[in-house]
Image: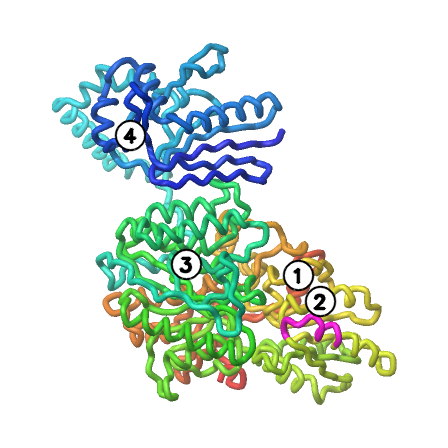
Amino acid sequence: MSRRHIRLTINYEGRSAPQQSDKPESYLYLFKETYEVRDGRDGKSHDPWPPEEFAREQFSDREGDERERGTRLFKYLFADNMKYYYDYAINELKRAKRDQQEVRCLFNLKNLPPELQRLPWHLLYDKDYLNATGEKGAFLCSEPFLQVKVNGRRQKKNPQRNDRFMNSAVWRFSSSLPGRVLSVIIVIVLLASFWYFNPLLSFIGYQTPSPAPTTFTNFCRTHAATNFVDPVPLPPPVLSIGAEPPPATNHSLMVGLSEGTFIYDTERVGESAEVSGKLSAAQDASAGRYQLASTEFQNLSDPHALAFAGSNDAEARIYAEDQSIFAQREPYITIIVGVTFDQSDQGSSRDTLQGAFLAQYSCNHVKEVKTHVVLMIANEGVSGNDYASSENEDRIRSMIQQQTANDRTIVGIVGWNVSSVTTKVVKELNMPADVCKISLPMISPSASSDSLNNMCGFFRITGSDREQATLAADYIQGKFPHHVVIFYDPKDPYSQDLDSTFNTHMTGQNPQPLIEAETYTVGDSDSIKQAFADEIKKATTQPPLDTIYFAGYPADLSIMLPQIATSPTITTVIGPDAFATFSDYRANATDFNKVYYTTFASQGEWTRNHLTEGTAFLKNYMDTFGRPPVGGIQAIDEDPILSYDAMQVLLFACSKTPSDLSATKVVNAIKQITVVAPFQGLSGRIAFNDTNFTSNPVYKSILIEHFKDGVPQNDDPEKCFLANDPDQDCATFNPALDQ
């Protein structure tokens, strides 16, 4: 039996924006502009009455019988065109039941002020509704296939029973002074009895159950911020250098900062309705309508609330959380999350935001939290050529400096996911004129360039390109290849570092394979196809090509995969951690059985090491961003795991210096995460060298995996994944790799 949901949402302050879903569940999502109150005589529309006045004059408590009150409330709610939408929803309900579909109809009233929220919505009565017994007239809350929610709270199913109890002698007595005194006496007697009999229960073997441990350690309980601070206006975004003026809805090429006032992730295929909704919500955020903007962003990203397919949109989730904090006027700290929504880095940037959001949410939604976390997204725009990229990095760095000078809630940066951007920004922020002067602590989830080894105020939770290329070379040598070709882009720092290290470690082996190099341009399909074709031609006069080291990105590898899959001689294609960003593979890439890669994070390690936090994270991730496998790959990318860890390390450092969140104090707190007192991350143990500081974590877990029928398989597990690993080597590090 198919399932169908029919939803009618009435937003007290919303905009009129009906959207019809193309999903099988066929949600119906509608807004009502404002409540319009009719005078009952001429039928003309008047300005909405003040809610408290209307509640007092029209629905005073216990006025008339239940059906009369429910009917008046029904007419008030479904006036004018809303009656049309109600009839549509009911007719769809009848049609679905007739087609033997599992169906539910939900009337969702949102953003009601307190005066309207207290009205007896559980008495909603439709005198024309054909109820389950075949008679006309029904309380909507008592019907089996209907639900009514008011500001997120489901109304009682049986309003008559509820009213009978409210009018009963028992309730009237318990509300009186003698009844309250008696209630207090009963509570005291029960507590005394429990205290008296507890030793007896222990004697007979009964033990009070222990509370379940929390899923994630929360580091947001005590911070310097104690009062709400109004959000500081952000500098306007600017178009990336080297980019053509984008269409009105394509903001991914803009350089700027945003807490919900501007949208960057707009290039979402097949999700134009969601993008339009995000742009509309951003307008409300810019106008200071925080609660409305939060509701709109939440609905756009909630797979249970809307028909849109973009439930994996972390940008909307983050903005919903930010705007809710502003609306509730909660004290908060701000963390900047750096991304690059250029087409070549969209998958990695979305992954980074997903992990950051899960860390933000796990902190903000804990009862004892005192200071919330706001995420400010910093988009670097298009990478483009070297000049354009450098200019864009200067722009985002300047914006961050300007914002930090005015916004005292900013405590650090998590980002970037691209080494070239990270290098430029951290150098300009914390090392002006090559002198260490920390402006903001910066933790990168995945920037692995060797040039980042010793940077002032900078940390990363991954190893370096030298480490992963060395591991890949050692692994390939164990397969005794005859002919190895390295594909790399000499203008890309990431690709260049990998090529240099891999080539060095493959030279001088016994037996020595034939090693060649082919250059290509990142993102240029023609250059990739030509480089591969040239090597195939050479292979006719040389030992057969059996191994490829591709020092680049999944989108570029995807161009070669169809030919590699059918090649009778090529047995292995190995690449760097970028290959673990599964969402960046192109749609035509489906055969991954020859692909191997190094990675800094893998969900397979959680089961192998019995890390329960990893299992909980996977469930949270799938519940929040559940998505079908990309190209048949049945695993989540490494980037959400790494960005979650980077967020947690920064929050942990903030919790260690709650009275002073200055950049120097936070950096010193991060440096205290050492081999003696390591941090257990989902990507493995995180610790820094406390005697000879480098930006790299000490002996960080790196893995080699390959695909088997779309499922990543671990080939070379590294030790020291757990913080309490008993292996003696986990308390040491390799100077050649960690300097």
Residue 523 forms part of the magenta stretch: yes
The amino acid on which the numbered mark 1 sits, given as a three-letter code, is: Arg
Query: What residue span does the magenta drawing correspond to?
Result: 522-530
Residue 296: give x, y in percent of width and height: 41, 46
Nearer the observer: mark 2 or 3; the answer is: 3
Q: Within 10 angstroms of label 3, few (less than 14), some, or many (20 or more) residues?
A: many
Query: Which percent across, then down, holds residue 177?
Result: 12, 24
- In which quadrant is the N terminus drawn? top right
In the displayed structure, would residue 399 be above or below residue 212?
below
Residue 388 position within the rendered picture, expressed as x and y whole percent measured from the top left: 51, 77
Q: Give the secondary structure at mark 1.
A: loop
- The quadrant where residue 159 appears: top left
Looking at the rendered structure, the secondary structure element under dot 4 is loop
**Location of mark 1 (residue):** 586
- The tag on residue 46 is 4
Residue wearing tag 3: 262
